[in-house]
Amino acid sequence: MSQTPHAPRTKTGDSGLAVRAAAARALAPVITGKGSLTGLDDHQVVARDRSLFKALCYGTCRTLPRLEALANTLLAKPFKARDADVQALLLLGIYQQLYLRIPAHAAVGETAGAARLLGKEWATRVLNGCLRRLQRESAELQAEVDRDPAVALLHPKWWLKTLRQAWPDDWQAICEANNLAGPMTLRVNRRHGDREMYLDRLDGAGIQARLCLHAPDGLTLETPRDVETLPGFAEGHVSVQDEAAQLAAVLLGPSLAPRPGARVLDACCAPGGKTAHLLELYDLDLQAIDCDDVRLARVEDTLSRLGLEATLAAGDATARDWWDGTPFDAILLDAPCSGSGVIRRHPDIKRLRRPSDITKLAELQARLLDNLWPLLAPGGTLLYATCSVLPAENAEQIDAFLARTPDAEVTMPADLGWGRASGVGRQLLPEPDSHDGFFYARLGKRPA
């Protein structure tokens, strides 16, 4: 059941202890449900160990149900709540043994030794004993815990139930895709040439990539790499964006391309990938809003690197205090959602989401739709998007909106070569080595 992907090899000595201690500190809030992986860059890790640090954190979250089941089997009694960092070290050690090509002595010795850097030297013997037992009994212990489907499929029970209800023929494939790291996909800035030209530049730099099947500006790298090593990245020639997310600009194209200077709203715009893509392709008067000032700053940084301009404003899309009263020709609502289509990129979602969150998010999405629709000019287009695979946030959400909104009509193309029909919209499910899970529905406002 274990996998052995390519991963950075550990270094021995103090560096090996430090990177594991840093990973334990980063993971402790996640495993206790009090934090996420978004702050990884804030942790002090030497440059040469950063790739290992992130591999440990993301990989441990991705495989957490199995790691925790094995930890429960290995421990004579659970750690106390105040020792969540030691629990995280044990999970890290199990992950290294089962999933990474790290020498056994490092996976065991340096993980156990890292407890000293956490000020908990007493834990070194406990960790060492647990991890050495796993070395001896790995196959038997894994077979035992994998009898539980939630462990074998690496998803909490409620996630399995929810996915099975939504996609009875596809839920296992969704889980399997969620358990793999997503590929690194690029969006070529058409202002600097097409993707075939950029593919040649990559080839000249010894970087292997392939054309995306559905996104006309997309390329997927055979192996992820640091963006600073990509030709022209600093100059704005290329950005990182999943293929599914790139389809937003394609769907809005028929509304925007014939209307130079169209007034467009990108609501809930952070981190700005779709904002930038629209501006790369079309002549727009674009306003982008987000309720998070920190994330909005990322949008500004992205546009600056790409040499693009938009009106940015901190604003709540369920209110209108940021609006100047002039209707928009098009609105992109990339709505807050469960993230169930991008779990492979944000594996902490499996731990941090709760069943009650889905209902609350669906209510928020409905408020956003109802608030933004009156801001759309007659004859205009609203594109609703989520990175979710759950009907409550997608097809059912749009069906309910249409039922209460008489001047809304469906303008979603019926002949798309990607995804599958889901209500009046289109659903993409996550696929290994391809796109994330995403939903789109395009609506038009009938002329007055």
Image (cartoon, rainbow, N blue to C red):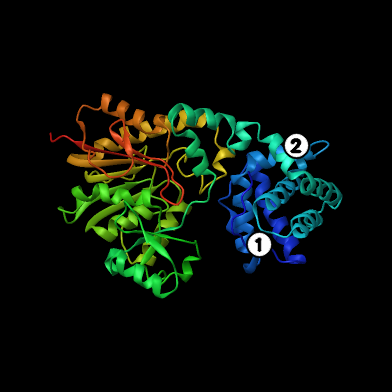
Camera-nearest residue between 66 and 290: 66
Quadrant assignment for the C terminus: top left
Could one spot residue 32 in this view of the protein?
no
Total marks in image:
2
Residue at figure coordinates x 78%, y 44% from the top left:
137
- Quick check: 160 above or below 325? above
Judged from this view, the residue extending furthest toward the bottom is 204
Residue at figure coordinates x 54%, y 31% from the top left:
160
Residue at figure coordinates x 31%, y 61% from the top left:
309
**Distance between the alpha carbons at the discs numbered 1 and 2:** 30 Å
Judged from this view, the residue extending furthest toward the top is 403
Camera-nearest residue between 366 and 414: 414
Instruction: State the image coordinates of residue 374 (x, y, percent, origin top left).
Output: 25, 36
Identify the mark at residue 30; answer none if there is no mark. Answer: none
Which quadrant holds residue 40? bottom right
Identify the mark at residue 72; answer none if there is no mark. Answer: 2
Residue at figure coordinates x 52%, y 41% from the top left:
176
Viewer-side label of 1, 2: 2
Which quadrant holds residue 118? bottom right
Q: Secondary structure at mark 1?
A: loop
Question: Which residue is under mark 1?
Answer: 44
Instruction: State the image coordinates of residue 240 (x, y, percent, origin top left).
Output: 42, 59
What type is the residue that disc 1 sits on?
A: Gln
Crowd tier of the residue under label 2, counting other residues whose Cα lies within 10 Å: few below 14, some 14–19, many 20 or above: some
Which quadrant holds residue 83? top right
Q: Is 99 situated left or right of 299 in this image?
A: right
Q: Secondary structure at mark 2?
A: helix
Q: Is 439 situated left or right of 80 in this image?
A: left
Camera-nearest residue between 160 and 404: 160
Instruction: State the image coordinates of residue 205 (x, y, percent, origin top left).
Output: 43, 74
Judged from this view, the residue extending furthest toward the left is 448
